Amino acid sequence: MASPTSDGAPGWIGARLKRKEDERFLYAAGRYVADVRLPGLKDVAFVRSDVAHGRLLGVTKPEGADVFTLADLGPLNDLVAGPEIAEFRTSLYPPLAGDKVRFVGQPVAAVIAATRAEAEDIAAEVLVETEELGAVTDAVAALAPDAPRLHEAWADNAFIAAPVIAGDQDALAAAPVVVRRRLKMNRQATVSLEGRGVVAHYDRRYGELIVHLSTQGAHVMRRGLAEVLGLAENRIRVIAPDVGGGFGGKNRLTPEEIAVCAMALKTGQPLRWIEDRREHLIASLHAREHTYEIALHAEADGTIIGMSGDVYIDAGAYALWPTGAFMEASMAARNLTGPYKARALNLQTYTVATNKAPMGPYRGVARPGACFAIERMVDELAAELGMDPIEIRRRNLITEADLPMRTVGGLSLDTGHYPAALDMACEMIGVDKVRARQKAGEADGRVIGLGIAVYTEQSGHGTSEWMKRKARVVPGHESANVRMHPDGTVDIAVGIQNHGQGLETTLSQIAATELGLHPDAINVRYGDTATTPFGFGTFASRSIVFSGGAVAKGCREVAAKARRIGAALLQVSADDVRIEAGEIVGPAGSVSLAEVARAATLRPEFLPEGEDALLETTVSYEPADSAGVFSYGAHAVVVAVEPLTGAVDLLDYVVAEDCGTVINPLIVDGQIVGGVAQGIGTALYEEIPFDPELGQPLATTFGDYMVPCASEIPDIRIGHLVTPARVTEYGVKGMGEGGAIAPPAAVGNALADAFRQSRAQFLETPFTPRRVSDAVAAADGEGAR
Amino acid sequence: MIDLSFTLNGAPVSQRVEDRTSLADLVREGHGLTGTHVGCEHGACGACTVLVDGEPARSCIVLAAMCEGRAVTTAEGLVDDPVMAELRRQFHDKHALQCGFCTPAMMISARDIIARHGAAAPATIRKELAGQICRCTGYAPIVAAIAAAGAALNPSSDAAAAAPHVAATAAGASDAS
C-alpha cells in the first residue's frame, strides 16, 4: 500500500484515503457560481436566435429596457480562435451576433434586470429580425458545391481539410481483405449537472474585474477575457469556486461569459448569468459528431494492415477560444489504428462548419469516436473472415515486446501489457459462460450479446504533443506554490482546477509523502488567479501527471531546505537527517517540522548562516518526455436485447485497465465508473438530433435528451493492472477519460454479436430502441419500418 | 403578488411573493439557502429536491404559493437529522460524490428511500433513485452508500440480515478492483 518517499520514508501513494473535499458537499455547503451573493447583483437573460441560419437585419429593444446588442458591448478586440495553421479558416464568434446568426440558440442580445424572471420577460419582448438562409445540418452534405455557405468568404464549408497518410501505402493497396463501412457517432451535449455560469463585477479596491466563472481553467480564461476586453491581465481576477462538473465543456471561453463581463464593465453593476438546461442543450458546446466512411485492410488470416477512407467532424458554426474543436479530426485519425500493430493509414479528414452550436472537447475527445470506428470494424472483419472477435484481437494487439513504439498515427505508446488487459476482461466477464448462455437461449425471447473493446488513452502530454496539434495555448507545464507556515502546516496553491476529480485529496497524498506529514496537515488551494500560480487547468487527463509532478517537485525543494535547517538545529550534517512523521530525524535526536518552520519564519536568528528565510517555493513541472503516457484497458459487456422493440439491457460490464501507479484507488475507481456511465450514455441514450431542413435542435429538455439514471447503469466491475510510466513522478498516468472511450464500441460489438447470425448492422450511436429494432428488422429482410 | 405563510426549516415565515415564484427560487434567492441546486428547471434532474410536509418535492416545479401553511425543509434543515448523518458517513466512505452538485438532493431522496423501504436492496434503490441525475459517479457508489446506510439504520429487519452481504457487494464495486 504505502510506497517509499524520495528519502525512503513510508508514504501515502496508493492509500485508499477518503476524500478531503467531501465534507462541504455532504453538509450542503458547496459554493457554486450561482451561490455567489453580491450587493446589487442583477441577472442577465439572453435573447437567442430562433433560426438556424440567417442575416440579422435588426434588433428592436423594448422602450426603457436595459438591453445590449453587439454594438453596445464594445469596443471589443477580435478573439481569434482555432489552431495556428495557415490553412485553417477562421470564423470570429462574436459574443452577441453581428451581421449573421448561424445556429438556433446563438446569443443575439442580452437583457439586464433585477431578477432572471424579469430579464426573461423583457427578452421575450425584444424583436429580432432575420432574413432566413438555408440551414446546413449534415457535415458530409455541407461540402457539396451548392450547399448554403455559413461563412461567405470561404470557398466551401470546411474549417479545414487535412490528409493523414502514413506507413506502407503499397500494403494497403494490395490488401486481400477490405471491409468498408459507414459509421456515425451522433451529436450530444456534455451535460454537467451545473451548467455554465458567470458572476462579474468591477471592484474598485484594485481596479479590477472580478469574474466568478464555472470553468476548468481560471488562468487561461483570464487570458482570453483580457484579450477580448482589452484589459491588462492583472486587472482581471477569475475565481472558479466549486464547479459542478465540466467534462471538457467548461474548458472553452464562451460568448455569454464574455458578454456578461463586457456589460459589467459598461454598467459598473454586478451581473450574473446562470445557464439553464435548455440553453445548455442548444447553445453550450456540443460534442462527438463524427462520420467515418472507412475501410479496414487486412490479410486473409486477419492480420490488420491499416485503415483508409474519410473522416468528417461536424464542428458546428464557430471555433471556440482557444483552440475550438480542431484536435478532433487529427486525434480521431491518429487513433484509428487503436491498440493494434497496423502499418498504414490513408485518411482524408474534414472539419466542417454546420448550423449547430460549436463543438468542443468532451471526456475522451475524439477517441470515443475513433475507438468506436476501429473496434466495430475489427468485429466486422472478424465476422467477414469467420473469426472469433477475441482471437482476432489477440493476433493484432501490440504486445509488451513491441513497446515502446511509435504507431503509424504517430502516437508514442510507452508502457503496458495490452493483451493482459484483454485476457483479464475476458476472464472477468466469463466468456465461456456467456457463450453457453447464448447457446441455451433466453426464456423471455431476448437475445444475448457479448462485446469487447480495447482502447488506449493518451494522458499527461505536454509541449511537443500540443505543438504538433498547433494549439493556440500549449499546456506544456503545471505549477505549484508550496508554503509551510510557522506551525508546520502547509498550503499548496496549484493552477489546475478540481471539479470532482478529488485533487484536494490526491495532491495532499503526494505532498504528505514528500513532506513526511499527514494529508490533513496539507491544504490544496486552486481556482483563483489572484492566489495561485499560472496553470492551464484540468482537462486531457493531465492533472495528476502535471500538477502531481509539480507538487512533488515543490515539496521536495521545501523538504530539502527543512532538512538543512533541521540539521543545523540538531547540529548535525544535512546528509544525516531524514524527514519523517512531522520530524526532522537525526542520528541522536529530532526536531519537529513546526520548530524548523518557526525558525524559517518567525525566528530567523536560528537559521543556519547563508540560509534564506521562509519554507516556500514556486515550481513548474513537465515530464521528461512530453509525448504523453498511455493508460489503456479492455471493456467487456453483456447485453440482452428485445429484438422487436430494440430495448437494450446491460447485464454485466467489466473494465480491465492500467493507469500506471495509482495514487488513490478509491478515486481511480470512481473516475472509471463515472466515465463508463457517460460512455453508456453516448452508446445508448444521448443525442441532439436536428431537423434536417430547418436546423432546429430536437432535444431541448431532459424530456427528449436522455441522460442515464441509476436504473440504466449496471454495477461496473473493475480489474487493475499496474505498469508504471517511465517518465512521470511515481509512474502515474492520467486516467480521467478512459472510462468514457470504450463503451460505445463495446456495446456496439455486443449488439452485433447478439445478431451475428443475421449480420444486422450496428454502426450508429446512440443505439436507441428505434435504431436497434430497425437494424434487426432490416437484416431479417422485413425492411425498415 | 400574494401573501404567503409557511415554515422553512422549522421557522415560521410570512412574506409577499410573486405568483410565479418557484419554491427553488424562493429558498435560494429569498432565503440564501443555496444547498438547493437548480439543475434543469423542469422537474427532471432532481437536484432541487426539498421536503414539503415531509415528502420529497422538486422545488423548481413547485410554486412558492402552493406552500401556504406547509412545512418546507431544505438540505440545510436536515443537517442534524440522524439518517442524514448516517448517509453522510456512507456517501463519504463509498465515494458516492464527485463534483457535489447533485449530492444534497440525492441525500434527501436517499433519506426518503430509507424511510419507506428500510434496509432496501440495491435493485429497489436503483428504481427509487431513477428521478435523480448524477453525472459524475455512475450511480453504483451512491446505491452502495444508500444500501449500507439503510442496513446500518435498520439492524433488526430481514433485509438487514443480508446487509453484510449487501455492503460487501456494494463496496466490491471498488474493492474487488
Image: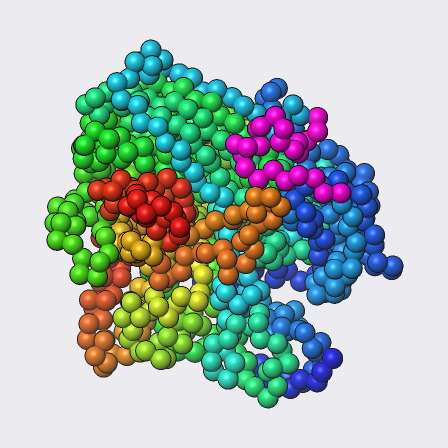
State the image coordinates of residue A88 (x, y, percent, origin top left).
60, 24
Judge left or right: residue B29 versus residue A644. right
Give above or below for A369 relative to A713.
Answer: above
User: Per the image, is A706 magenta?
Assistant: no
User: Per the image, is A139 magenta?
Assistant: yes
Q: Residue at x 70, y 63 (%)?
A: A116
Q: Nearer the viewer, residue A199 or A784?
A: A784
Residue A690 appears in view: yes
Q: Nearer the viewer, residue A283 or A724?
A: A283
Q: Hey, which residue is sitting farthest bottom in the picture?
A: B69
Judge left or right: residue A455 versus residue A192. left
**Occupied quadrant, residue A756:** top left
Q: Nearer the viewer, residue A776 or A110?
A: A776
Q: Nearer the viewer, residue A366 or A531?
A: A366
**Occupied quadrant, residue A323:** top right
State the image coordinates of residue A207 (x, y, percent, origin top left).
77, 46
Give above or below for A298 relative to A10.
Answer: above
Q: Residue at x 71, y 76 (%)?
A: B18
Residue A510 appears in view: no
**Occupied quadrant, residue B95:** bottom left
Judge left or right: residue A538 versus residue A785. right
- Residues shaded magenta: A131-153
Q: Residue at x 37, y 75 (%)?
A: B113
Dominant secondary structure of the residues highlighted in magenta in the image: loop
Give above or below for A708 relative to A614.
Answer: below
Instruction: Tally the numbered discs.
Output: 0
State the image coordinates of residue A643 (x, y, percent, origin top left).
29, 53
